[in-house]
Amino acid sequence: MCSAALSGTEAGRKAPIRIQEKQCRSILTASRLPGGGYSANPYTGCEHACRYCYASYMSKFSGHTERWGTYVDVKQWESAGRLERLRDKPVFLSSVTDPYQPAETVYGRTRALLEELAPSGCRLSVVTKSDLAVRDLDLISQFPDAVVAWSVNTLDEEFRQDMDAAASIGSRLEAMRAFHEAGVRTACFAAPIFPGITDLEALFEALRGRADEVWLDRLNLRGPSRQVILRYIREKWPGLLPLYEAIYLEGDPVYWAQLDRVVSRLEGRLPFKLRSFIGHRGAGG
């Protein structure tokens, strides 16, 4: 459990962000993700406020009643524990937050954690929507076989702005290039794929010379996010509404099966490795 230390509100945002520091017992949590290891979330909550974010359910476990995307708890911890237990073990930043959200520029908790973990020999993986990761290129390059992934599911900046308050697509792609050219393994987390909106072929072209791997996953709509996204499609992409209703209200699998075949045909012609979860049916789609 964490106890509140102080609170404040970040200025200059469309939706005010309530930020408070909290003392935590441990920053590393045994991971239930495939491959085991540990996950680390230097923050609770996320300023990026993605409309489709699966992590929004965390509010009920953290005692927050505010809307997802309007609060951030900044974690403080004494130590990550015995570093020798982490050698060759996966450590994932982060499972339910973005380690490089804007609060990181002020509080630096992600960099502090990287500095602590650098001698451990752990296998570091980072997923973010921010170009701030470039600040820590010097540290991340010290981890053996590190991989840094940027979440990019569109080249349409207007659509991106509708979905999140994170860095621009161009900024993410340039950050990816910086790591790629520095010899750090890079990935694009092309997810969630929005039917009829995400143009995978165009995205694959943009990733040449930037990504070593591309991870693909479908849009799964769970709980309140289903109505949020369907309402958005109805208002902004009405021509796609029948497709979304077929997928998400009627459970029609045809679209994903067709897209899976397209990806399979493209795979051999691409300069990076593909890891596709499109064919794995998830909740709500």
Image (tube, helix red, strand yellow):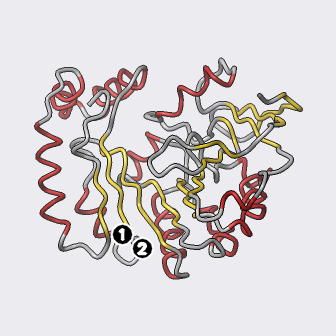
Q: Residue furthest front?
A: 85
Using the image, determine if residue 282 lies above or below residue 164.
Answer: above
Tell me the residue at 22%/21% (across/down): 249
Q: Position of residue 160 (x, y in %)?
A: 42, 47
Label 2 crowd bin: few (<14), some (14–19), many (20+), radius 10 Å: many
Q: List the residue tagged with mark 1.
A: 207
Using the image, determine if residue 250 lies above or below residue 30.
Answer: above
Q: Position of residue 285 (x, y in %)?
A: 26, 31
Horizontally, is 263 left or right of 84 in the view? left
Secondary structure beneath label 2: loop
Label 1 crowd bin: few (<14), some (14–19), many (20+), radius 10 Å: many
Secondary structure beneath label 1: loop
Horizontally, is 199 left or right of 242 in the view? right
Between the C-alphas of marks 1 and 2, the distance is 5 Å
Tell me the residue at 78%/33% (across/down): 9
**Type of the residue with mark 1:** Leu
Badge 1 vs badge 2, beta-carbon distance below 8 Å: yes
Q: Position of residue 86 (x, y in %)?
A: 66, 59
Tell me the residue at 26%/45% (across/down): 197
Q: List the residue tagged with mark 2.
A: 210
Tell me the residue at 35%/57% (across/down): 215
**Type of the residue with mark 2:** Arg
The quadrant where residue 234 appears: top left
The quadrant where residue 10 appears: top right
